C-alpha cells in the first residue's frame, strides 16, 4: 500500500483545477494566479472549496494516524502496544522496588520465632510500603533477622534511601523494630516508546533462547533489579557470568531459576554474582565566597559543607534530589560506570547553588570501574576555603 498524505494546498489546487476543467470557474477570472499570489478572492464557490479542502486535509491526518499505527517505526502509545500484542511481546511495565530489611527483637527468645511472609513495613512517612517475600525467622537466642521485601506499588516513587524503612504496619505481636542498611533497588519506570520499539523490532530474537534480547526482555520485567551485565564465555564455551545489582542471595536464586526455565539455552551454565564494590574516596577544596561582598558565616559554610558531602554521596550511590519537577530519584553510578570528577562538579553545580569553585585533590583523574564493579562512596572530605 503506497499511501501518501496530501497537504491542504494539494487538495485545494486539485479541486480548483477540476472546477476549471468542468467550466465551473471562468478562466477569465484568473483564479489560479490570484491564489498563487495569495490575493483576496470574493467568490463563495471558491471559499466553499477551501473549507471542504481543509476538512479533507483533517481526514487525511486521521488516515495517516491509522496508516502509521501498524508500522513499528512510526506507531506510538497504544498503537505500539497493539503491535506488541500481536507478536506476544508486551511493553515492560514499571517494576517494584526491593529492599533488604533487618528486623530486631526487643529481647532474646528461648524458642524459634517465625513470622509468615507478607509482613508489611514502611518508610518514615508510611507513603512507601513493602512486604516481606520470605518468612521472618529468629533462631532461638538471636535478636536479628534479615528478609528481602518488595514494594506494594511500582515505579520510581517506591525507591527509598538507606535507613528509611523504620515503621511496622502489620500487627506487631513481638514488638519488632526494623531498618534497612542499603537503599532500595528496582522501581524502574515503564518502557517509553523508544525503548519498547527496540524490543518489538527484535521480537524474533527475544523468542530465541540465550540471545541478548531474551535477557533484556527478562530483566526489563524483573522486580527489584537496578542493573545487570552479561559476560559470555566466561569460563569456557557455554558458560555465562551475570552481574546483578543488587546481589542478595534470595534475588539471585530467584533469577537463576527463572533464567534456566525460560531464557537461557538448556546447556548454558549460568553463574550469578553480586557486583564487586569499588570504593571511591574524595578530597575536595570548595570556595563559596568568590565575588561576594559579604562572605558566608562559619555556620552557613558548615551547612553548605554538609550539603555538598550529601550531594557527592547521592552522585555516587544514588538518592533523592530536588528538581523543578519536584523530588526525584537520582540513580547514581551504574554498573561499570567510571567515576569522572568533571561530571561530579557539573552535578554539584546544579545541586548546590552557593558553590563557586571546587578542586579535587583526590582523585586527580577519573577512576575506571570494571563491568563487574559498582562504584560506592567511601571517605568523603570537603574542605571549605
Image (tube, rainbow, N blue to C red):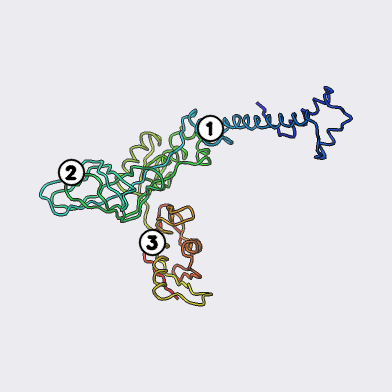
Tag 3–tag 1 contact (CB < 8 Å):
no
The disc label shown at residue 79, or none: 1
Secondary element under disc 2, as helix, strand or loop, is strand
Which percent across, then down, holds residue 202? 51, 36
Q: Is residue 132 visible?
A: yes
Closer to the camera: disc 3 or disc 2? 2
109 in relation to 213, above or below: below
Which percent across, then down, holds residue 230? 43, 45
Label tally: 3
Q: Where's the N terminus, which quadrant? A: top right
**Alpha-carbon span between mark 3 and mark 1:** 44 Å
Outermost top residue = 22
Secondary element under disc 1, as helix, strand or loop, is helix
Q: Earlier in the sequence, mark 3 or mark 1?
A: 1
Q: Where's the C terminus, which quadrant? A: bottom left
Which one is nearer the viewer's eye here, 374 or 351? 351
Which one is nearer the viewer's eye here, 171 or 23? 23
- List the residue tagged with mark 2: 114
Closer to the camera: disc 3 or disc 1? 1
Which percent across, then down, holds residue 84? 49, 32
* Crowd tier of the residue under label 3, counting other residues whose Cα lies within 10 Å: few below 14, some 14–19, many 20 or above: some
- List the residue tagged with mark 3: 377
* Crowd tier of the residue under label 1, counting other residues whose Cα lies within 10 Å: few below 14, some 14–19, many 20 or above: some
Amino acid at each position: 500500500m503506497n499511501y501518501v498524505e496530501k497537504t491542504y494546498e494539494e487538495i485545494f489546487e486539485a479541486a480548483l483545477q477540476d472546477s476549471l476543467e468542468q467550466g465551473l470557474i471562468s478562466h477569465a477570472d484568473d483564479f489560479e494566479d490570484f491564489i498563487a499570489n495569495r490575493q483576496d478572492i470574493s467568490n463563495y464557490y471558491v471559499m466553499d472549496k477551501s473549507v471542504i479542502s481543509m476538512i479533507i486535509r483533517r481526514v487525511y491526518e486521521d488516515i495517516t494516524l491509522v496508516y502509521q499505527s501498524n508500522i513499528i517505526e512510526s506507531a506510538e502509545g497504544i498503537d505500539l502496544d497493539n503491535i506488541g500484542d500481536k507478536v506476544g511481546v508486551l511493553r515492560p511495565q514499571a517494576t517494584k522496588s526491593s529492599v533488604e530489611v533487618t528486623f530486631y527483637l526487643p529481647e532474646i527468645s528461648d524458642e524459634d520465632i517465625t513470622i509468615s511472609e507478607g509482613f508489611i513495613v514502611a518508610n518514615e512517612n508510611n507513603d512507601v510500603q513493602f512486604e516481606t517475600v520470605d518468612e521472618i525467622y529468629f533462631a532461638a537466642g538471636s535478636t536479628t533477622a534479615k528478609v528481602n521485601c518488595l514494594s506494594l506499588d511500582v515505579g520510581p516513587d517506591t525507591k527509598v534511601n538507606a535507613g528509611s524503612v523504620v515503621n511496622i504496619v502489620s500487627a506487631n505481636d513481638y514488638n519488632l523494630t526494623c531498618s534497612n542498611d542499603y537503599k532500595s533497588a528496582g522501581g524502574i519506570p515503564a518502557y517509553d516508546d523508544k525503548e519498547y520499539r527496540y524490543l518489538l523490532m527484535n521480537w524474533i530474537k527475544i523468542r530465541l533462547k540465550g540471545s541478548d534480547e531474551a535477557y533484556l526482555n527478562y530483566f526489563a520485567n524483573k522486580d527489584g533489579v537496578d542493573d545487570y551485565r552479561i559476560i559470555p564465555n566466561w569460563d569456557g564455551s557455554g558458560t555465562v557470568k551475570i552481574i546483578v545489582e543488587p546481589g542478595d542471595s534470595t534475588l539471585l536464586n530467584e533469577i537463576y531459576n527463572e533464567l534456566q526455565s525460560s531464557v537461557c539455552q538448556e546447556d548454558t551454565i549460568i553463574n550469578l554474582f553480586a557486583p564487586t564494590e569499588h570504593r571511591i574516596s574524595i578530597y575536595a577544596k570548595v570556595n563559596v565566597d568568590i565575588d561576594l561582598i559579604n562572605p558566608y558565616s562559619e555556620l552557613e559554610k558548615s551547612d553548605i559543607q554538609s550539603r555538598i558531602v550529601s550531594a557527592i554521596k547521592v552522585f555516587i550511590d544514588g538518592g533523592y534530589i530536588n528538581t523543578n519537577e519536584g523530588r526525584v530519584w537520582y540513580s547514581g553510578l551504574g554498573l561499570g560506570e567510571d567515576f569522572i570528577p568533571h561530571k561530579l562538579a557539573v552535578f554539584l553545580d546544579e545541586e548546590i547553588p552557593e558553590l563557586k569553585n571546587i578542586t579535587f585533590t583526590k582523585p586527580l583523574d577519573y577512576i575506571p570501574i570494571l563491568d563487574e564493579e559498582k562504584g560506592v562512596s567511601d571517605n568523603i572530605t570537603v574542605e571549605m576555603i
